[in-house]
Amino acid sequence: MAKFGVVVFPGSNCDHDAYYVLKKIFNCEVNFLWHKESDLKESDVIILPGGFSYGDYLRSGSIARFSPIMNSVIEFANKGGKVLGICNGFQILLEAGLLPGVMLKNKSLKFVCKDVYLKTVNTNSIFSNSISNGNTLKVPIAHGEGNYFTDNDTLNELINNDQILFKYSSKDGNVDDEFNPNGSLLNIAGIINKDGNILGMMPHPERCCDPLLGSTDGKKIFSSIINSFIN
């Protein structure tokens, strides 16, 4: 069974959510990793959780990127280690250069907190192998800077390399501006790196794994990661 490490930054507020899901629902071994330390505690997967690291001063994730733990995370990722960045964690991955692009303020200039539907564009990745083609996921979002942007060359690379994993869509999987909650290019909700071992996504799968919360669609993402160690 995979061993997980959840990084805790000052201002993280979804670290315990991720810990609970991995420990209580999937019965995985999981440790908190304090941002000032450098030891990843032999983790097989690193989770950069959502929240407001360092109060989101300057740009979201821009200060957390320089926390001591991130040197270890970057080294781990560059060696093929699996990393999942959720919401603020996605922003940190962008600031650290582990994923391409930037996050802008939501097109509405308002904080958006609601359930959205996600179309899985690539079901062959480490993070999506448990998701059936055509099935949409109902997952909550909660962010003020989730408007993904990059240059045209990078965007074409993401498309050609199947690096776009999730797109905001209708319940039936229709990808349209109508279902884009933040103005993100091509309705992008989550991308992976070229090697496929790093995922950044704005929606919160850890908030929809327990039936008490009204949806268990997020389990498919964590199940996919765990399956990658079995298959």
Image: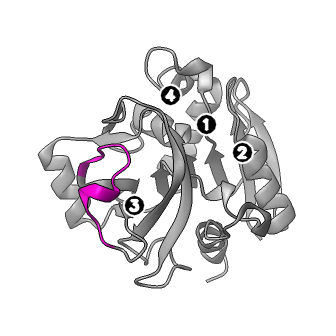
Determine whether label 2 and label 1 are within 8 Å by CB. no
User: What's under tag 2, amino acid-wise?
Assistant: Val
What whole-number distance in Å separates the C-alpha atoms at marks 1 and 4? 16 Å
- Residue 186, image x, y percentages: 24, 55
What whole-number distance in Å separates the C-alpha atoms at marks 4 and 2? 16 Å
Name which of mark 2 and mark 1 comes first in the sequence: 2
Closer-to-camera residue (55/110): 110
What whole-number distance in Å separates the C-alpha atoms at marks 4 and 3? 23 Å
Could you tell me if residue 127 is visible in this image?
A: no
User: What's under tag 4, amino acid-wise?
Assistant: Gly
The magenta span reads 174-185
Looking at the rendering, in which quadrant would you find the C terminus? bottom right
User: Which mark is on residue 195?
Assistant: 3
Left or right of residue 119: residue 223:
right
Local SS, label 4: loop
Residue picked out by circle 2 = 6
Q: Residue at x 25, y 55 (%)?
A: 177
Name which of mark 4 and mark 3 comes first in the sequence: 4
Name which of mark 1 and mark 3 comes first in the sequence: 1
Determine whether label 1 and label 4 are within 8 Å by CB. no
Local SS, label 1: helix
- Residue 222, image x, y percentages: 64, 66
Q: Residue furthest top?
A: 58
- Residue 42, image x, y percentages: 75, 51
Task: Say if the magenta span includes residue 162.
Answer: no
Q: Residue at x 46, y 36 (%)?
A: 91
Left or right of residue 132: residue 1:
right
User: What's under tag 1, amino acid-wise?
Assistant: Ser
Determine whether label 4 and label 3 are within 8 Å by CB. no
Report crowding for label 3: few under 14, some 14 to 19, many 20 or more residues within 10 A (C-alpha). Answer: few
Residue picked out by circle 4 = 61
Task: Say if the magenta span includes residue 179.
Answer: yes
